[in-house]
């Protein structure tokens, strides 16, 4: 496995987590929490897409523009989604 797609997915996951935190302030975990949740979600989302054959960094390891864009999209979406889930669960636990 090539390391560059993973780095792109982690970085875009951190950005996606922070964007989701800004869009949903009630679910926000703070900048550091959003970044951590985004990094984890970006790694998971990007790897899931590459296992499905959609994302970059698969068996061929070629880094063309399509695989870079799909790594960014998969990482950002995964980061935003995981941050939203963690923020939602945090909000539910806070109510009790």
Image: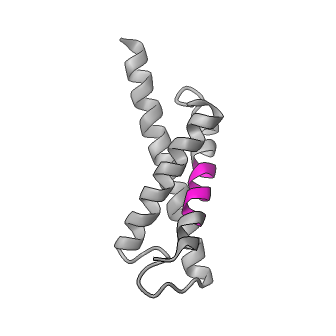
Total numbered badges shown on the rendered structure? 0
* The one of 94 and 44 positioned closer to us in this rendering: 44
Instruction: Find out whether residue 9 is within the magenta segment.
Output: yes
Dominant secondary structure, magenta: helix
Quick check: can you spot residue 20? Answer: no
69 vs 5, nearest the viewer: 5
Q: Name the spot of residue 32 as percent of width and height, x first.
A: 62, 36
Identity of the residue drawn at 60% across and 85% down: 64
* Residue 65 image offset from top left, x and y in percent: 62, 81
Q: In the figure, 51 relative to 13: above or below?
A: below
Q: Is residue 17 above or below residue 87?
A: below
Does 23 lie within the magenta span? no
Is residue 42 visible to the viewer in this orientation of the structure? Answer: yes
Q: Position of residue 56 (x, y in %)?
A: 50, 76
- The vertical placement of 46 against 55, above or below, is above
Tell me which corner region of the image, top left, top right, bottom left or bottom right, holds residue 3. Answer: bottom right
Q: How is the image coloured?
A: one colour
What span is in magenta? 8-16
**Quadrant including the N terminus:** bottom left
Q: Identify the image quadrant of the C terminus.
A: top left
Q: Position of residue 62 (x, y in %)?
A: 54, 86
């Amino acid at each position: 496995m090539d390391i560059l797609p993973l780095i792109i997915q982690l970085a875009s996951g951190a950005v996606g987590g922070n964007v989701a935190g800004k869009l949903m302030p009630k679910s926000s975990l703070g900048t550091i929490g959003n970044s951590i949740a985004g990094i984890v979600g970006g790694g998971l989302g990007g790897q899931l897409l590459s296992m499905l054959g959609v994302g970059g960094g698969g068996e061929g390891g070629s880094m063309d523009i399509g695989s870079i864009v799909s790594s960014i999209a998969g990482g950002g979406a995964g980061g935003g989604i995981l941050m939203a889930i963690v923020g939602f669960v945090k909000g539910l636990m806070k109510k009790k």
